[in-house]
Image: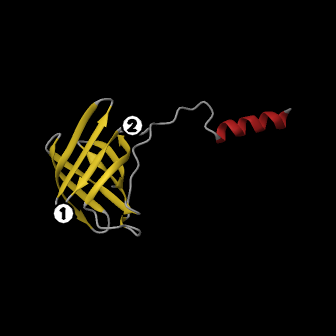
Amino acid sequence: MKLWSCCVVLAAAACGGDKVSAPLSCDTYTGGLLTGNSGQLPGTYTLRSVCSGMKPDQAGASGTVMLTEVNFTASITNQGTTTTYSGTYGTTAPDGITVHLMSPVPTDLVGTYRLRNDSLAVSGTVVGQRLSLVGTRQ
């Protein structure tokens, strides 16, 4: 009986038991330009994943990210409401990105990015809140 009780206690401890975990921050993507891309950063990407603040990702969110040589526009629709993040951007080696937003508020999105196999992932902070976007090149 002691062995069985010990196993139950160890299993509960290993799986977290009834302990409440803290919320998880949105994912962070790093790496910059990696292999398997049909081009550089500029392009239009269909969003596959959107996280704002904390996980989980926003279920049902959709939209696009459009990058030119200097302009960044992300239009995200969630629960019937569209938010557009737009401004100019610049990158720094190896994977830094800063977007000087004019919309929805004039501020900077400062973070990192990864472009691999034509899948763009951008993560950063906007007005103290985490934001992660993942999209596939159209």
Which color scheme does this rendered protein use?
A: secondary structure
Q: What is the quadrant of the C terminus in the image?
A: bottom left
Mark 2 or mark 1, whichever is nearer to me: 1
Give residue 117's quadrant in the image: bottom left
CA gap, disc 2 to disc 1?
Answer: 28 Å
Q: Residue 122 appears at what percent x and percent y?
A: 32, 53
Residue closest to the eye, 52 or 7:
52
**Residue hosting label 2:** 58
Counting other residues with Cα less than 10 Å from the Cα at mark 1, is it few (<14), some (14-19), or many (20 or more)? few
Residue at disc 2, secondary structure: loop
Query: Residue at point 32% right, 44% down?
Result: 130
Q: Residue 14 appears at what percent x and percent y?
A: 65, 42
Q: Amino acid at mark 2?
A: Gln
Q: Is residue 90 above or below residue 56?
A: below
Q: Is residue 138 left or right of residue 55?
A: left
Circles 2, 1 touching at the beta carbon (< 8 Å)? no
Residue closest to the eye, 65 or 29:
65
